[in-house]
Amino acid sequence: MTKENNIKTRFLGNSDYTSVWNKMKNFTYSRDNETEDELWVTEHFPIYTLGNKVKNTRINKSSNIPLLRVDRGGDITYHAPGQIMIYVLINIRRMGMSVSNLIYILEDAVISLMKKFDVKASRKKDAPGVYVKGEKIASIGLRITRGSSYHGLSLNYDVDLEPFSDIDICGYQDLKATSLKSLKISVNKKIVADTLVELINKKITTFQT
């Protein structure tokens, strides 16, 4: 049976990571079973974020980019302007969805997006995210609490890739990052964001148990 779900999208513009993180937590911990699901689209000022279960990770100590430990899964990653962030605040329990289902859906949305640009992208077992020629173009980190998700997906559109070289991206040594710009894909950022939101929305709302 197909589950129908109405997902509202909010566009937040450029934002401070900590502020949006706190808003996500407030939204999730105050919602009930009737609360409408939402997708939040934003870009962040430069920051490294570290998943809540990571004990040791490499970061170049000469970097002046702030580091923040947060409550999502995953390891260390980098956020900055030019990276499209889509936060996924949905009641997965109501959808009959597992966290693995949601990760697959987010990966599939990015893979479908890249296909529109005639670029072959793929997922990797035990390494959530989306890759092009072995380089990471999209990262996924989620938190599930009270049957609902927050945090979400980052897609490298036209972000400075140099800060990624100062970390082991998502905990993997020698893993490199790429972007739409690096792949010579010249499409308006708003169109990319809107298309990705549409794909995520469609794949979530047509999820079948």
Image (cartoon, grey):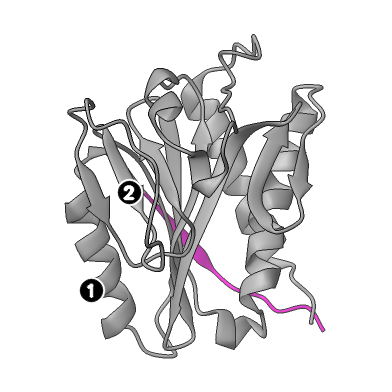
Residue lying at 45% horizontally and 36% vertically, measured from the top left: 84
Residue 59, image quadrant: top left
In the rendered image, residue 24 lying in the magenta stretch gets the answer: no
Decide which of 119, 116 is in the foreground and name it: 119
Task: Indicate which label's residue lies in the foreground, 2 or 1.
Answer: 2
Is residue 157 in view from this perspective?
yes
User: Which residue was labeled with disc 2?
Assistant: 49
Circle 1 Cα neighbour tier, 10 Å, few/some/many (<14 / 14–19 / ≥20) = few
Three-letter code, disc 2: Thr
Residue 196, image quadrant: top right
Q: CA distance from mark 2 to mark 1?
A: 19 Å
- Dot 2: element: strand
User: Which residue was labeled with disc 1?
Assistant: 26
Residue 138 location, x and y as percent? 58, 39
- Dot 1: element: helix
- Left or right: where does residue 194 sit relative to residue 199? left
Residue 188 location, x and y as percent? 52, 18
Look at the image and give the residue range highlighted in magenta.
1-10
In the image, residue 20 above or below residue 169:
below
Three-letter code, disc 1: Asn
Residue lying at 42% horizontally and 43% vertically, measured from the top left: 77
Q: CB atoms at circles 2 and 1 under 8 Å apart?
A: no
Mark 2 and mark 1 lie on one chain; the one further toward the N terminus is: 1
Decide which of 28, 120 is in the foreground and name it: 120
Circle 2 Cα neighbour tier, 10 Å, few/some/many (<14 / 14–19 / ≥20) = many
Decide which of 62, 38 is in the foreground and name it: 62
Q: Which mark is residue 152?
A: none
Residue 162 location, x and y as percent? 41, 18
Q: Main secondary structure of the magenta part?
A: loop
